[in-house]
Amino acid sequence: MYSNEESPWQKAEPSLSPRFLLLSDPLNFFERINLSVFDRSLFSMGVTTLRDTFTVALRGLWTKYDFDGMLFKAKETCLEQIAIDIDRLSVQVGGQRVFSNFSLRLAKGHKASLVGPSGSGKSTLLLALLGFVAPTEGTIRIFEEELTAASAWPLRTRMAYVPQEPELGEGTVRQILNHPLTFKNNRHLQGNIERAPELMEKLYLPRYLLDKDVTSLSGGEKQRVALISALLLEREILLLDEASSALDQSARQAAIDLLKSRKDLTLLSVTHDREWIEAADDLIELSGVQRTPKGAGA
């Protein structure tokens, strides 16, 4: 930015619009901002159309100059899409304040671990993201859309949630996995049931469990079946609440590796496990009043 001196446009002629110059007279455009002869010589080599003008700008000239806040603004990095945006959120349950003034911005594709002492509101925060707990103050936005009573249902269709003790219902594992895919909003995903055996192998579950009754499964097996069910729904955001607490170290690492491989999946996981914390892109501490970015001092 040109905070302490005149920009090239001001030096050239303040009354002329840079956009007007670029569209009407590209040669004069580059002359007025005092580019080198080499840069301007591009136009003598046939770079004279409007499309070529934008191509030249995109290839490097935008990184040299700030054009007074206009479209042609120098940038070296792309803005990340924000999947979860929590702004100064406060929540009360039963008249008791659970946490206050909590803020968080989680970019699409990032994997974050949410930690904090018991009773700090970690599980409540996940329920608030799903629209099941209404905040007393602050806002939640999911992919830039504010979470309200009216928007809660459609926004939930962009999220999946796996609790510590999933209630899977009755039937075989195959039936449990297939059931959500029969819902109206998920019918286009019915073919995903064919991916279940592959996902089971990646999570160290034998394929024969597909035909086993869910009531006979162990706690760790139930957690992994619930995770597979969530993945088959192909939601953009996955919320986990101690969803691997019953897994041994190898199975837990397999779950982490599987989720990390989903580059577009945004993950927020409540956990106390060292493996999740070390694998996370962001470490978020919820103590009722603050957020600590990953890498901050203890």
Image (tube, rainbow, N blue to C red):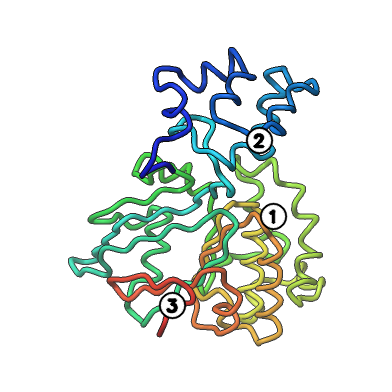
User: Measuring 63% from the left and 37% from the top, which residue is drawn there?
Assistant: 61
Say which quarter of the image contains residue 49: top right
Q: Where is residue 121 in the image (x, y as percent from the top left)?
A: 34, 71
Disc 3 on helix, strand or loop? loop
Which mark identifies residue 178?
1
Tell me the SS state at disc 1. Answer: helix
Give whichever of 236, 28 is nearer the camera: 28
Query: Are there few (<14), some (14-19), or many (20+) residues within 10 Å of tag 1?
Result: many
Disc 2, SS: helix
Is 297 positioned to the left or the right of 252 in the image? left
Mark 3: few/some/many CA within 10 Å (<14, 14-19, 20+)? few
* Callout 2 amino acid: Leu
- Residue type at mark 3 is Ala
Residue depicted at x 58% and y 79%:
278
Who is closer to the viewer here, 138 or 134? 138
Q: Is residue 98 above or below residue 146?
A: below
According to the image, label 3 marks what residue?
296
Q: How far apart are marks 2 and 1 (CA)?
A: 48 Å
Q: Which residue is drawn at 67% across and 67% down?
A: 260
x, y (%) of residue 296? 43, 77
Residue 58's mark?
Answer: 2
User: Cα distance, mark 3 to mark 1?
Assistant: 43 Å
Query: As drawn, which residue projects farthest toward the left?
Result: 95
Mark 3 or mark 2: which comes first in sequence?
2
Mark 3 vs mark 1, foreground winner is: 3
Residue 256 x, y percent position in the rendering: 65, 73
Local crowd at mark 2 within 10 Å, few (<14), some, or many (≥20)?
some
